[in-house]
């Protein structure tokens, strides 16, 4: 029988995630199989993502109160992490409610010894307070624990951006994410969508970053009838920037070389017209992921200008003639360091080796796609990371090997700041995802 206890479900969800489950998939499955109210879904989601987001901090706190932590069951530690998270970060949740619910969960999932352990730890925290970060002498380790980010990421940010900017980014990534959507210009105007959403009870603000974006609050955008009708789709503001920079003509033949799940593909498709010969080809390695692209395109009523192909973007010679596409978008596979506000596991799972391997893949994709672009065509390269190794370093290497391409300034419809012909958005700039966009034009043959 489904449970209606969001705190119990949070502990069970966190336990599965700590053993390798994907947070978004696991959480969605739990919500679908529960009978939670929308308020309790909000609490469950908050606890799950909050514990993941602050995991290094919570581990540091708990280790001061829990002897032999390595001998304690994972679910017990997740229960204590979730309790500390609620006590420290959720102002509207009284400590007594956290105590009572945590002890009930300990009894339900464990035995009397577990109940006594949980009760004892929580009472110690209440009496003594949480330990100060000032006990940590190493400055990078201190930042790592305080902001719950792996040390290598902090070192890279400081080396590349300076300490002040790195600290500003660290402070921003534990703030709540905004909920942004893109209106579908094929079906509705922005003004009409705002009115419909307001009538449904949403609070709506204009995006300060992208022309196509709106910021919603009060409830999940996926509940809106306008989402179901395809009049809008959920997409981070920063992720809309690459396509906004493309200057698409209705009859263009465009390649989206790394398409799934299709947010940018459908954004491109909005500007194409099948009667003019417009088409966007969506590539992905796997048919299963392309099915999601097709599903999104159908909901947004742009499937008439969509083609899909399951293939490796590094091997385009096997499928397309040279100079086949008018424009190409490469939203390259990357470490995702710019996403760590919304996808907090990234901050623990990725390594510098991953970054270097991905940079090699990115170069291979660029070299493969370059030959398929018509002379005079635009190639847009973007990532959702903020590290130079996958951004400006990749572009510099590509240009050193391809003299028939040149950088051109990235034009933003909202006049977002530029940096050395690149558009770089950091998580603290607009409280959105970190993103990188570079526009290249093909000036001649090989």
Image: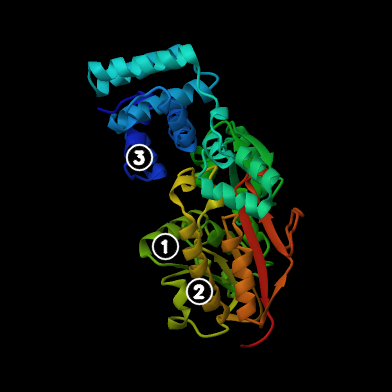
Of the image marks 1 and 3, the number of the one nearer the N terminus: 3
Q: Nearer the viewer, mark 2 or mark 1?
A: 2
**Residue 112 in the figure: left or right of residue 49:** left
| Residue nearest the viewer, comparing 212 with 127 | 127
Using the image as rendered, state which of residue 251 and residue 171 is in the foreground.
171
Where, quadrant-wise, is the N terminus in this rendering? Answer: top left
Question: Does 5 appear above or below 315?
Answer: above
Asked if residue 306 can be seen in this view, the reply is: no
Point out residue 410 in the picture as x, y percentages from the top left corner. 72, 63
**Eye-nearest disc, 1 or 3:** 3
- Label 1 residue SS: helix
Task: Name the residue located 38 percent from the left edge and 65 percent from the top edge.
Answer: 286
The circle drawn on residue 304 is: none
Rendered location of residue 279, percent (x, y): 55, 71
- Can you tell which quarter of the image residue 273 is in? bottom right
Q: Are marks 1 and 3 in contact (CB under 8 Å)?
A: no
Rounded to the nearest angstrom, the CA distance separating label 3 from label 2 is 34 Å
Residue in view at x 51 percent, y 66 percent:
304
Q: How many marks?
A: 3
Q: Which of 60 and 324 lies nearest the eye of the viewer?
A: 60
Which label's residue is closer to the chain start, 3 or 2?
Answer: 3
Rendered position, 322 above or below 362: below
> Mark 2: which secondary structure?
helix
Residue 65 lies left or right of residue 337; in this view the side is left
Residue behind mark 2:
364
The one nearer the camera, 81 or 48, is 81
Q: Secondary structure at mark 3?
A: helix
Q: Which residue, given by chain and number where applicable, does mark 1 sit on?
A: 290
Q: Is residue 157 above or below residue 35?
A: below
x then y, percent, for residue 152? 52, 50
Q: Residue 18 shows which numbered tag? A: 3
């Amino acid at each position: 029988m489904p449970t209606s206890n969001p705190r119990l479900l949070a502990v069970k969800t966190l336990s599965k995630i700590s053993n390798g489950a994907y947070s978004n998939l696991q959480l969605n499955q739990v919500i679908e199989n529960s009978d939670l109210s929308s308020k309790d879904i909000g609490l469950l989601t908050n606890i799950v993502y909050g514990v993941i987001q602050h995991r290094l901090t919570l581990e540091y706190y708990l280790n001061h109160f829990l002897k032999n932590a390595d001998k304690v069951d994972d679910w017990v530690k997740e229960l204590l992490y979730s309790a500390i998270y609620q006590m420290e970060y959720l102002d509207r949740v009284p400590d007594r409610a956290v105590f009572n619910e945590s002890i009930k969960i300990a009894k339900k999932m464990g035995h009397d010894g577990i109940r006594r352990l949980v009760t004892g730890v929580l009472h110690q925290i209440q009496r003594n307070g949480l330990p100060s970060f000032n006990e940590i002498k190493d400055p990078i380790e201190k930042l790592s624990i305080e902001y719950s980010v792996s040390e290598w990421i902090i070192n890279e940010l400081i080396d590349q951006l300076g300490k002040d900017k790195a600290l500003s980014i660290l402070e921003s990534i534990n703030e709540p994410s905004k909920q942004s959507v893109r209106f579908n210009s094929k079906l509705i105007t922005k003004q009409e969508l705002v009115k419909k959403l307001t009538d449904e009870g949403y609070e709506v603000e204009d995006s300060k970053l992208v022309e196509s974006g709106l910021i919603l609050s009060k409830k999940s955008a996926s509940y809106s009838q306008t989402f179901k009708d395809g009049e809008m789709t959920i997409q981070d503001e920063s992720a809309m920037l690459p396509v906004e920079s493309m200057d698409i003509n209705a009859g263009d033949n465009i390649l989206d070389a790394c398409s799934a799940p299709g947010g940018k593909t459908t954004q491109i498709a909005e500007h194409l017209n099948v009667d003019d010969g417009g088409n966007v080809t969506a590539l992905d390695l796997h048919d299963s992921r392309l099915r999601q692209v097709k599903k999104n395109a159908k909901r947004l009523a742009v499937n008439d200008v969509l083609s899909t192909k399951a293939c490796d973007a590094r091997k385009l010679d096997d499928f397309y003639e040279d100079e086949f596409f008018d424009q190409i978008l490469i939203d390259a596979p990357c470490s995702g360091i710019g996403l760590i506000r919304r996808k907090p596991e990234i901050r623990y799972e990725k390594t510098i080796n991953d970054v270097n391997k991905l940079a090699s893949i990115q170069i291979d994709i660029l070299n493969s796609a370059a030959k398929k672009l018509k002379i005079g065509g635009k190639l847009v390269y973007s990532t959702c990371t903020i590290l130079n190794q996958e951004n400006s370093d990749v572009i510099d290497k590509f240009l050193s090997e391809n003299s028939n391409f040149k950088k051109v300034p990235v034009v933003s419809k909202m006049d977002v700041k530029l940096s050395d012909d690149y558009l770089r958005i950091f998580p603290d700039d607009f409280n959105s995802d970190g993103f990188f966009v570079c526009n290249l034009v093909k000036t001649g043959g090989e």
